[in-house]
Every structure is written in structure tokens, then in C-alpha cells.
Amino acid sequence: MPPRTANPSTRQTELLEAAYQYALLHGLTDLSLRPLAEAIGSSPRVLMFLFGNKDGLVRALLERARAEELALLDGLRRPEQPVGLAVAAQEVWAWLAASEHRPLLRLWAETYVRSLVDPDGPWAGFAKGTVEDWLDVLAGCQPQAERDAEQGAVRRTLTLAVLRGALLDLLATGDESRVTAAVRRQLALLDGVDQADD
């Protein structure tokens, strides 16, 4: 039976949100329907009925996590007045470094890795999709001439590499002040290169 997500019921929406909060605390790698259902006041049978199977539930949870990530990214899009890569990256880093976002970011890192080692599972395409999402948003933060220039994609890729590397360091160490100082330093260098190339 396919998951019933085209027009989710109120109950499906409530259970998805509860399951998402559970996944933020416990991750998805070892997700088991019975403990999840018990924790959110449901049953494995109901979850199977609403989401089709465990993979359907995992896909719905990944879509929910991605929606939160995309909400941040969409807030950076200002096509009429692009903020530039350095400013956009600083805004993104401030959000990434906030301690209240660590559960979501741990879930993101877990899913990113899972999509690389299990490309046929419910996480299929997650890593590639998230790279494309972020590069697309960063492109929208560049002035048109920079975006279209040959080096525009290189600058976006470097900016994303700085943010992703710093995020993994922060998740591993929790050393927000050291990592933030490094991010600021590297973004200033990237910004200097951008200005020198203009």
C-alpha cells in the first residue's frame, strides 16, 4: 500500500510531527516502529496504514526535515537585491551554530551519510539533493553578473564547503567559538578573493 501523503489527515500530520520530534532525539538509523509508536501514542499498525511502510515513514520524516532546512534557505533569497555570498554565508552560519538547531543538524548529518552508503533506501538522493538546494540558494544570493560568471559556481562551492566542513566540526566538538572564528576568517578570505576578481 503506498503512503497516504497526497492529502494528509489531521491525525497523519500530528503523528508525523510527533515522529519528527522523536527522530530529532533518537535519529533514524535504528528507527523501530514499535518504540516510536509507543512514544508518540500510536501503534505500528496505524503508522503502517498512514505511511505505507517504514520506508514511507522515513521518507515523510526526511521531507519534514528538508522543509525546515528550505525555510531557512528561502529566507536568504532576495533576487531583487542579492546580499552576496559572504553575507549569506554569515547568516546561514549564525543559524547553523545556534544550539537549538543541533538536533536537526545531527539528523541531517546522519541522513546525508546514510544516503551515500545506502543509495537505494528511503534516503536515496538526499545528499545530492541537499547540495543542489544549497548551491541554488547561494546562487540566488550572488549578483547576476557574479552568478553567471565562470567563477560563480566555484565561489558557491567554496562557500558551501566552508559551511559544511565547519558544521561537521561543530557537531563533533561543540566548540562553537573556535569554529565560528574559523568560519568568519575563511569567509573574509573568500570575500576578499571575490572582490579582487570583480
Image: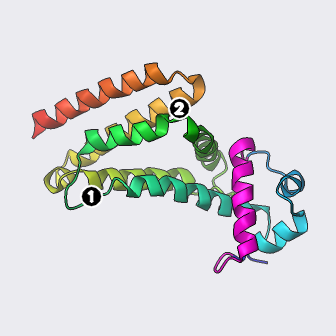
Q: Position of residue 73 (x, y in %)?
A: 41, 53
**Residue tagged by mark 1?**
78
Q: Looking at the image, which residue is at 57% across and 39% down?
A: 100
Left or right, residue 41 beside residue 62: right
SS under mark 1: loop
Q: Position of residue 48 (x, y in %)?
A: 83, 69
Q: Quadrant of residue 59?
A: bottom right
**Residue tagged by mark 2?**
168
Q: Looking at the image, which residue is at 79% across and 45% down?
A: 30
Left or right, residue 197 beside residue 39: left
The residue range painted magenta reads 5-28
Question: How many discs appear?
Answer: 2
Q: Position of residue 147 (x, y in %)?
A: 21, 53
Q: Looking at the image, which residue is at 16% across and 51% down?
A: 149
Q: Which mark is residue 30?
A: none
In this rendered view, identify the residue nearer to me: 176 or 139: 176
Identified by mark 2, the residue type is Leu
Q: Nearer the viewer, mark 2 or mark 1?
A: 1
Sequence-wise, the earlier of marks 2 and 1 is 1
Crowd class of label 2 (few under 14; some 14 to 19; many from 20; radius 10 Å): some
Q: Position of residue 32 (x, y in %)?
A: 84, 52
Identified by mark 1, the residue type is Arg
